[in-house]
Image (cartoon, rainbow, N blue to C red):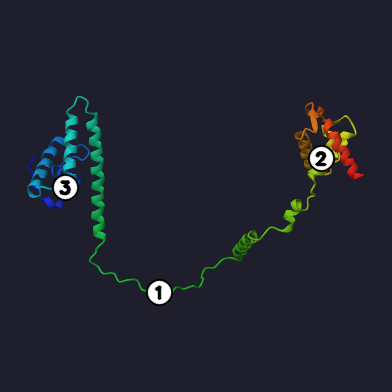
Amino acid sequence: MEKLSYKLDVFEGPLDLLLSLIEKNKLSIYDIMISDLLDQYMEHIRAMQEQDPEIAGEFLDMASRLIRIKSASLLPRPEEAEELKRELTGQLIEYKKCKQLAKILSQRICFDNYTPAPEKIKADMKYKRTHPPVYIAERYISAAGRGQAKLPPPEEAFSGIVRRRIVSVSSKIVSVMRRLWSGSEVKYESVFDDAQDRSELVATFLAVLELIKGKRVTAQGEGRDTTLIMQKTAHKEVQDIGEIDA
């Protein structure tokens, strides 16, 4: 290879320098001869250091990178060198494409031209588009529907909650205890026979739970055979209830 003469101020970085060396020596960017490229790169680095001892660190970093690739290629298993070489090749290809695009953009954009500021133009607020009547009707119905959705729900929506009959659990406790007083034991399902609606069913169920929790009633058996039996300590309570009602 012929010895190159360098113009030190034209290279923007180590990739720019390497790309220039590859093009100057007519090398393939996909098959770089690191040994030949390293010698010329180091010559350029020495020339740069003669003019400026504080050479840019990125140039020195690239030099150590090339030396590492060359050293790895001399080992019995040069797989690491090939991997490092492929990484460097990819960066050079990407940098070359960026330079080509920058050259194209520089031809299209000229910063020497003067472009005046845009004038303020009064906006035309008149709607000029036309729509078929069916389209307008559909949009109106859609907008009206969105407006209705923001309104509070009608009273009928709460009728099933507000107007539902409220049944006291305490009243059902009294009813269950009276029923147990009339017999030694009562089938569990039979205490729900008089329930007229869901509210009464729930109140009766909670009443039975309260009686069992208070140990005034015990439940024996399983499933449909479950029976409720009043404890002896609860008989006095039922008598007191009867006296009050009387």
Relative side of 192 to 118, left or right: right
Amino acid on which disc 2 is placed: Ile
User: Marks 2 and 1: which is nearer the front?
Assistant: 2
Amino acid on which disc 1 is placed: Ile
Residue closest to the far bottom: 122
Q: Quadrant of the N terminus?
A: top left
Pointer 3 or 1: first along the chain:
3
What percent of the width, then of the height, locates residue 14?
A: 18, 45
- Of helix, strand and loop, which one carries label 3? loop
Position of 151 relative to 25 (above/below): below
Determine contact: label 2, label 3, CB under 8 Å: no
Residue at (25, 55) in percent of width and height:
104
Determine contact: label 3, label 1, CB under 8 Å: no
Pointer 2 or 3: first along the chain:
3
Residue at (16, 46) in percent of width and height:
17
Position of 227 relative to 203 (above/below): above
In the image, 133 versus 147, the foreground residue is 147
Q: Is residue 91 visible?
A: yes
Residue underneath mark 1? 121
- Of helix, strand and loop, which one carries label 1? loop
Q: CA distance from mark 2 to mark 1?
A: 83 Å
- Of helix, strand and loop, which one carries label 2? helix
Residue underneath mark 2? 173
Q: Quadrant of the C terminus?
A: top right
What percent of the width, then of the height, locates residue 111?
A: 24, 64
Q: CA distance from mark 2 to mark 3?
A: 93 Å
What percent of the width, then of the height, locates residue 191?
A: 84, 36
Q: Which mark is residue 56?
A: 3
Residue at (24, 47) in percent of width and height:
95
Position of 83 relative to 95 (above/below): above
Pointer 2 or 1: first along the chain:
1
